[in-house]
C-alpha cells in the first residue's frame, strides 16, 4: 500500500503540539454543510477556557463555499450549541458544535437540529433514550476499500465480523484511535466492533437522551474523519460502498422511552411499532440525506437488511425493519432497534421522526411546520 | 517483502492511545466462533474497573455472522467467565473471555467450556495440572510462510530448531512481543522457542489447574492473533501448513494429577496411560475441531509424530503418542506428555477428555451427556 500523497512527519508535528500556549485557547467551530452529510470546521483563538457553548460568540462563514448560499449574499451564522474537549490539540482546547443560520437568521436547510430540539423539549418527561450504531468503511486514497488487494477483492464475507488477525481486519488502529479520541472528548461512545465486510467497522454512541444523541453522533463522526485524516485513509459513510455480495453500512437506531424500560414495557413498544408501520414511507424519506435514494442501494432484503418498500418487526430478526432484542422480549421491557437508517443519515432527523411518530403522533406538512417552528 | 496492504502508522496511533480516558474502562469481550477454532471480539465501555467477570453484564451478538445462528433468529449470548489485563489498550482496560449461549440459553455447539468446567469441578481434589505447548506458523499476507523466499522454500530442516540468526529464524519479534503481552495480561506463559520448520514457533502455557488451562490457552491464542495483526503477519494454527518434508504443528499436552506427582507416581501414570490406550479413537476425534480429519494430515508417523491410527507410549520417545520424560522415569513420579493434540485443538475438549478417561473412566454418548449437563 503506497503512503498517502500528503503524508507528513508526525514526529515533527509533535514538537510543535508540545509548545505551551499560555492563556490562549483554540476553539474549533464545527458545522454540517449544504450536503447534509459533510462536516466543516474552522478555528478561532479565545483568551479564556469556555465551560459552556453560550460563552462563545456567534461566528460567520462563507456559505457560498459550502453549498449553502450564493456568493452575492454568502454570510451565514454559526451558533455554538455543544462543547467537547479537543483530542488533537488537547485540553484546554475545544471542539464547538454549531447550528447554521442564514443571512436572515432563519435556519439553514440542513440545520435539522433546531426542530429536533424543539420536539425533544416537548417530551422531556418521556426520557427518550437513543443508541446509534454507526457503520463506516475505510478507503485508501484511490477510494478502494483500505487493505483490499489492488484491483481485486478479498475472500467472501464470513470470517471478518468481530474478527482478529491481519488477514481478517483492516485498519483496527483507526478504530482504536477513534475510541480513545471519543472518550477524551467526552463523547458517549459505548462500544466498537469489526463489521461483516473487511475494512468496515462500527462504533456505537449512546445511550443519549434527547438532543444529546444527534450532538454526540455528529461530533463522533467529525472525530472519525479527523482521525482517518491523520492516518492518511478515508472514512466513507456511504450506505453501499461496494456493489455486489458485500454488506452495506447502516446506522441502526436503538430507542426506548421510560415507559418501555419499566415493567409492562412491551405493549408500549408494540404500540410504538404500529405507529412506525403506518409512517414507514415518511421515515424512509428522512433516513438518509437524499429522501431514501441512498438507502435504496442498501435496503435490498439481502445482507441482513429489510427491503426498502417493506415494513416488518420481529424478535431477534436481523432481516426485519424493527428488531426487538431477545433479552427484551424475555424481560417484558426494554428497547427496540430500528435497522432502517442509512449510515449517512442525519441523527437529528432520525431521532425527531422517532419522537413525532411514536410519542407525539403528529406530522405537519413541511412548509407549515417550518413556518410554525420558526 | 512488501508491507501489508492495510499497514497503518503506529506513531500516529500511539498519540491517541496515550489520551487519558477518565473513569471509562474498555472491556473487550472475546469468544470462540462456530468453527471451533476462530476467535471473535467486540468492545464495550463501562464506567468502573471490573475485578471479577461476574461484575460484567451478559452481552449478545449476531450469531448469523459467525456461523452460529440463522439471520431470522440470530441473537446469541456472551457470558463473561475470565478477566485479563489488556496489553494493547493497557490497564485498566480488560480482555473478557466469554462462553457462548444460544437464543434458548443452551450452550452453543462450540462452547466446550461448559462441560469441561463441570468435569473439572468433580475432580478438584485430584489437582490436575496441565501444560500445553502451542506451536504455530507465521504466514505473510499471501499465506506463504513468513520470510520464506517468494515462490520458493528454505533449506531443509535441521538448523532452525531453537536457533538464532537471520538465516535461521523468521519473525522472532512476534514471539517476543507475544511473550510480553501474555505476561502483562496475566496469562501463565512458561516459555518459548523456535521450532523445527522456519517461521514456526512455540510457546507453552501452564502449569494450569483444571479449567484454567483452557481459559489461559484461548486468551494466549487471542493475544497471538492480535499481536500478529499489529505486525501485519498471520499466525496459522493449522496442523500441517506445508505438505512435504516439513514439520506439522501440534499442541502437546503435559498432564499430571497430585497422585502422579507424589512418591509412587509412576504406577498411577501407567494406569492412566492404559486407560488412554483404550480410548485412543475417541481422543483423536476430540483432538482437533474436525473429528481427527485435521490431525490426519499431521500424525503420519514421520516428523516426530505417532501415526494417527496407532497408540504407543514410551520414555523419551517423540515418535510415541505418549512420552514419559526421562527425568520422571528416573524420579519415579512426575507427569507425562500426550503428543497427539493438534495445534488447532480446543483445550477444553482435550483437558476434559483427559479427566474423563484417566480419572472418571466415564464416557456417555454425546446426546445423553448434553441433555444431562444442560
Image (cartoon, coloured by chain):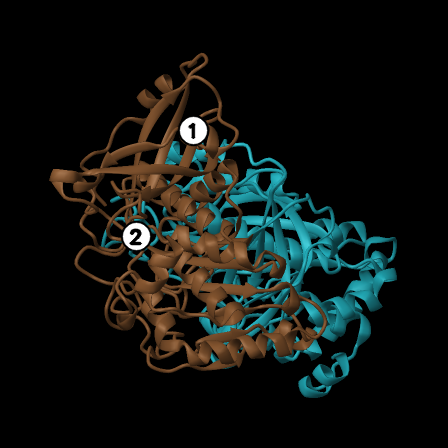
Chain colours: A brown, B cyan
Image point (18%, 38%), residue name: A74
Q: Earlier in the sequence, mark 1 or mark 2?
A: 1
* A370 or A65, nearer to the observer: A370
Q: In the displayed structure, does residue A149 sit left or right of residue B279?
A: left
The kind of secondary structure element at disc 1 is loop
**Residue B192 in the image, given as x and y percentages of width and height:** 56, 43
The residue to which callout 2 is attached is: A110
Q: Residues within 10 Å of mark 1 (few under 14, many from 20)?
A: some
Image position of B201 (left or right of B119): left
Identify whether B35 is placed above or below B260: below
Chain at numbered mark 1: A
- Across and down, in percent, residue A256 comes to 58, 65
Residue situated in front as seen by the camera: B280 or A222: A222
Q: Position of residue A298 (x, y in %)?
A: 30, 70
Measured Cα–Cα span from mark 1 to mark 2: 22 Å
**In the picture provided, is B270 more to the left or to the right than A236?**
right
Towards the viewer: B215 or B45: B45
- Mark 1 sits on what residue? A56
Q: Which mark is residue B17?
A: none
- Residue A357 place in picture, x, y as percent: 47, 71
Q: Is residue B123 visible?
A: yes
Amino acid at each position: 500500500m503506497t503512503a498517502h500523497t500528503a503524508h507528513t512527519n508526525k514526529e515533527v508535528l509533535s514538537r510543535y503540539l508540545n509548545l505551551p500556549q499560555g492563556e490562549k485557547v483554540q476553539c474549533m467551530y464545527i458545522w454540517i454543510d449544504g450536503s447534509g452529510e459533510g462536516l466543516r470546521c474552522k478555528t478561532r483563538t479565545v483568551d479564556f477556557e469556555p465551560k459552556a457553548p453560550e460563552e462563545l460568540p456567534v461566528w460567520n462563514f462563507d456559505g457560498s463555499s459550502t453549498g449553502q448560499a450564493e456568493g452575492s449574499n454568502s454570510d451565514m451564522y454559526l451558533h455554538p450549541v455543544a462543547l467537547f474537549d479537543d483530542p488533537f490539540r488537547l485540553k484546554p482546547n475545544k471542539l464547538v458544535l454549531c447550528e447554521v443560520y442564514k443571512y436572515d437568521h432563519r435556519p439553514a436547510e440542513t440545520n435539522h437540529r433546531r426542530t429536533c430540539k424543539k420536539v425533544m423539549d416537548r417530551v422531556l418527561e418521556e426520557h427518550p433514550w437513543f443508541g446509534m450504531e454507526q457503520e463506516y468503511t475505510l478507503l485508501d486514497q484511490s477510494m478502494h476499500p483500505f487493505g483490499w488487494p489492488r484491483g481485486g477483492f478479498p475472500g467472501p464475507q464470513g470470517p471478518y465480523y468481530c474478527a482478529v488477525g491481519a488477514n481478517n481486519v483492516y485498519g483496527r488502529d483507526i478504530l482504536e484511535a477513534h475510541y480513545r479520541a471519543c472518550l477524551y472528548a467526552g463523547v458517549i461512545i459505548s462500544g466498537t466492533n469489526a463489521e461483516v465486510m473487511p475494512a468496515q467497522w462500527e462504533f456505537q454512541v449512546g445511550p443519549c437522551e434527547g438532543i444529546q444523541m444527534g450532538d454526540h453522533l455528529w461530533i463522533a463522526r467529525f472525530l472519525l474523519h479527523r482521525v482517518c485524516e491523520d492516518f492518511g485513509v478515508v472514512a466513507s459513510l456511504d450506505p453501499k460502498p461496494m456493489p455486489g455480495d458485500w454488506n452495506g453500512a447502516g446506522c441502526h437506531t436503538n430507542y426506548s422511552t421510560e415507559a418501555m424500560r419499566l415493567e409492562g414495557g412491551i405493549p408500549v413498544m408494540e404500540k410504538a411499532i404500529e405507529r412506525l408501520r403506518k409512517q414507514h414511507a415518511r421515515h424512509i424519506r428522512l433516513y438518509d440525506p437524499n429522501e431514501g435514494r441512498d438507502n435504496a442501494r442498501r435496503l435490498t432484503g439481502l445482507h441482513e437488511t429489510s427491503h426498502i418498500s417493506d415494513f416488518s418487526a420481529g424478535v431477534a430478526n436481523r432481516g426485519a425493519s424493527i428488531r426487538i432484542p431477545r433479552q427484551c422480549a424475555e424481560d417484558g421491557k426494554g428497547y427496540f432497534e430500528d435497522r432502517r437508517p442509512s449510515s449517512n443519515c442525519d441523527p437529528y432527523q432520525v431521532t425527531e421522526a422517532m419522537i413525532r411518530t411514536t410519542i407525539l403522533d403528529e406530522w405537519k406538512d413541511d412548509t407549515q411546520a417550518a413556518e410554525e417552528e420558526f
